[in-house]
Amino acid sequence: MKHAFLIIAHHNFEVLKTLINLIDDDRNDIFIHIDKKVKDIPEFSAKYSNVILVNNSNRIDVRWGNVSQIKSELALFELARNNGPYEYYHLISGVHLPLVNQDEFHSYFKSISGKQVLSPMIYSDYELQQKGNRMNFCMKNFQGSRIAQISWRLGIMAQTSLGFRVNKDRQFIKASNWVSITNEAVNFFLEHKNDILKRYRYSMCGDELFIPTELKYSGIKWDIIYSDKYLYHEIGIANATFLTEEDVEKAISLNFLFGRKFSSNDINVINQVVEKVKSK
């Protein structure tokens, strides 16, 4: 069975074109969600893979930390599943690049067939309670509005002082939102789509919570790998920083599957990845 690459993108489209080139393979199909705020969408094509974009009516205006991030992921799951089924669904960003060739990539997933692959993240109980068990208001405009940030903080302080909690039936787990999951897992998330969107409506960065948490509470015994070698990225103050040539050398030598983030402004780093992957 083929694999589906699900890509969430909003800028750096030259990197996205390189990504498509590196995963273009008759064993793969490629599905892309372009942020609704983007007005001019370039042409994307591949030689061997089908490339399918989420249509305009289903595109999401994605905002950092907001439930819209989950909506865009579910839109990709649904589009791919409707064109599938696929053995694996790889959810990545438009500024990911693979650090292995497709023979190596498929060989790895054949060796772990049926397992869900997640990338672990460091977290505290306080963080999980704040993001999942409080109502995080004003997240839609959080990044660009000081008023929204102050309102959010006041809301969290009030709920904490009152001991107010939502989602009392959940102890949340955090992992990277970039995952590789099976057709069975995708079916599970789509079957419970409405419940998920309701539960995570007021979460903060719920895209990093819902996949590991909902798998845990599904009542199904999933075989999950939390892989330290799935994704190489360097975290800055809040977000991943752009990788350097030194980062790429290190990540490839350590056999990471993906690297993130890459910038169109640093073509030397992108060319380095292409050369390394194509020469394998």
Image (cartoon, grey):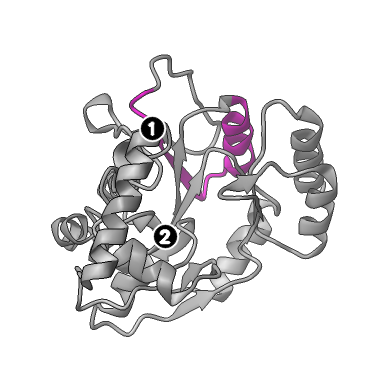
| 248, above or below 254, in the image | above
Please state if 48 lies on the left or on the right of 193 as rendered: right
- The percent position of residue 90, horizontal first and vertical second, equals 47, 54
Q: Which residue is mark 2?
A: 208
Dot 1 and dot 2 residues touching (CB under 8 Å): no
Which residue lies most toward the top here? 40
Image position, residue 103 (x, y; %): 66, 57
Query: What residue appears at the point 58 percent right and 39 percent down from the top-left corner?
Result: 95
Q: Is residue 118 above or below residue 73?
A: below
What span is in magenta? 14-37
Q: Quadrant of residue 35?
A: top left
* Quadrant in which the N terminus is drawn: bottom left
- Badge 1 marks a residue whose secondary structure is loop
Specify the label residue 145 is tagged with: 1
Place residue 140 in its image quadrant.
top left
| Nearest to the observer: residue 163 or residue 180 | 163
Say which amino acid is labelled 2.
Glu
